[in-house]
Image (spheres, helix red, strand yellow):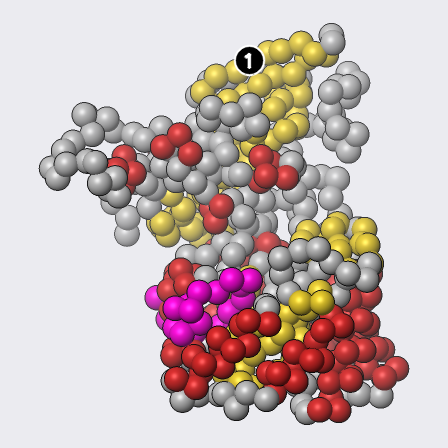
Amino acid sequence: MATNPLAPDWLGRPDDANALAAGLWPSSATRADNGELVIGGCSAGSLAARFGTPLYVVDETDARTRAAELRTAFEAEFARIGTSVRIYYAGKAFLTTEFARWMVSEGLNIDICSGGELAVALAAGTPPHRLGFHGNNKSLAEIDDACRLGVGAIVIDSPQEIGRVAEAAARHGIVQAVRLRVNSGVHAHTHEFLATSHEDQKFGVVLEHAPALVARIRAEASLRFVGLHCHIGSQIFGADGFAESASRLLAVHAALLVGGPVPELNLGGGFGIAYTSADRPTPVAELAARLADIVASECAERGIPVPVVAFEPGRYIAGPAGITLYEVGTTKAVDVSGNPRLYVSVDGGMSDNARFALYGADYSVRLAGRVSAAEPVLVRIAGKHCESGDIVVDADYLPGDVAPGDLVAVAATGAYCWSLASNYNFVGRPAVVAVRDGEARLLVRGETIADLLARDVGVSTGSTTGGLTTGGSTTDQPKESIR
């Protein structure tokens, strides 16, 4: 049977709609003898029965392994060119106290961009000096807290922040390390990049303004300038965009050395992952070697020492380590100009994965509770929300007998799903569980209707929810006590 014309060009009709494509799923993902999906030694059915659905599932070993492998590869390659690296896990991708502990224990620092993320990292026991604080509009209170608590570096994102950070640091009697975020004019996404001279965006300052702003920073006794910072995009395949950006930054870096030390260069993150079988992300060892060569070559050309180089990966670590489990509620076959599509509606949606609604992100889906020999059909996994754009998986193939009550799993949802989750339609956000060596434990409990009503001042003390037991999902409480 030919590929459905409604399918995107990159999506071929699979020979086996049960197969777990390599690179999309956590490294532990497999099928049990009965066909169930197993992650971290825990079957999808047992997880759904215990914790409910929708459910975020994070493979602890996979996340730790990806963090450690990335750090090791970058350390080795940059040692080869005579310098060291600092790896910051980008907490915006996915952050809980336990996940933060995993990252720190694997030798990573943590990048934060709000007072809330600062609180989570500190609650996890992260030493403040291992934190980097981003943000284009940090509040005065956030800046004060960062200086008071001894955050390792604050990223200056605008001219106004120079004085604000300097005042806070002086008030607390410290010299605060700062980086200056600049726009290199390089925009990268997947395997393409665009180089321009100016940017129209909210983050950072124009690269040409960096010397004057660094002079202002150096004039403040309570600030210590450590280097430039740049972030060129996200979901980047290859290193060409990084090469162009590094070249532009190091030209300014070299000029800044005339006025004082510039010990670091932060090239940001954005390393891509596979969301579909068509994606071909750059292997981390290859990426590390290429980036080290780029920095070494650019420094040699300018006759300057190779600085300490920092990177901020988030998606690369968290994304493939996570999946989301859903239960199918309804199916609906539609005909589009003589071509069939099956809508499969699940018990979550844009409240737990907003990425398709935000920017048309693609994902992959598989039956999680069983396998089937039925012919593959083109499906669209739809959410339960009152929006036509409430889509979780725009296009993939599932066995044609997918039916209400089936469990389905969406791959690579570890990054930017839980962190972007909302209560749209007053649906509670799902629980997050970690799996490892056949054991599952709760990281974040699912929200209850009581949670949703708790901040509503119109609800009288002692009122009930009218006997309701769910806020639109079945993740309100674990189905059994947690060890």
Asked if residue 165 lies left or right of residue 412, the reply is left
What residue appears at the point 52 percent right and 38 percent down from the top-left corner? 353
What residue appears at the point 69 percent right and 80 percent down from the top-left corner? 212
Q: Is residue 64 above or below residue 108?
A: above
Total tally of numbered discs in the picture: 1
What residue appears at the point 74 percent right and 9 percent down from the top-left corner? 337
Q: Is residue 282 above or below residue 25?
A: below
Please state which of residues 39 and 292 is positioned toward the viewer in this rendering: 292
Q: Name the image quarter holding the N terminus.
A: top right
Q: Residue furthest right?
A: 301
Please state which of residues 425 and 481 is positioned toward the viewer in this rendering: 425
| Magenta part of the chain | 123-146
Asked if residue 291 lies left or right of residue 378, the reply is right
State the image coordinates of residue 347 (x, y, percent, origin top left). 43, 27
Q: In the picture, residue 251 is in which quadrant?
A: bottom right
State the image coordinates of residue 15 (x, y, percent, origin top left). 73, 26
Q: Residues within 10 Å of mark 1 (few under 14, many from 20)?
A: few
The answer to whether residue 145 is magenta is yes
Under circle 1, the secondary element is: strand
Query: Mark 1 is on which residue type?
Result: Lys
State the image coordinates of residue 97 (x, y, percent, origin top left). 39, 61
State the image coordinates of residue 467 (x, y, percent, origin top left). 19, 25
Please say whether residue 311 is visible from this viewpoint: no
Disc 1 target residue: 332
What residue appears at the point 53 percent right and 54 percent down from the top-left corner? 93
Q: Is residue 108 above or below residue 326?
A: below
Asked if residue 120 lies left or right of residue 478, the reply is right
Please say whether residue 182 is visible from this viewpoint: yes
The answer to whether residue 447 is magenta is no
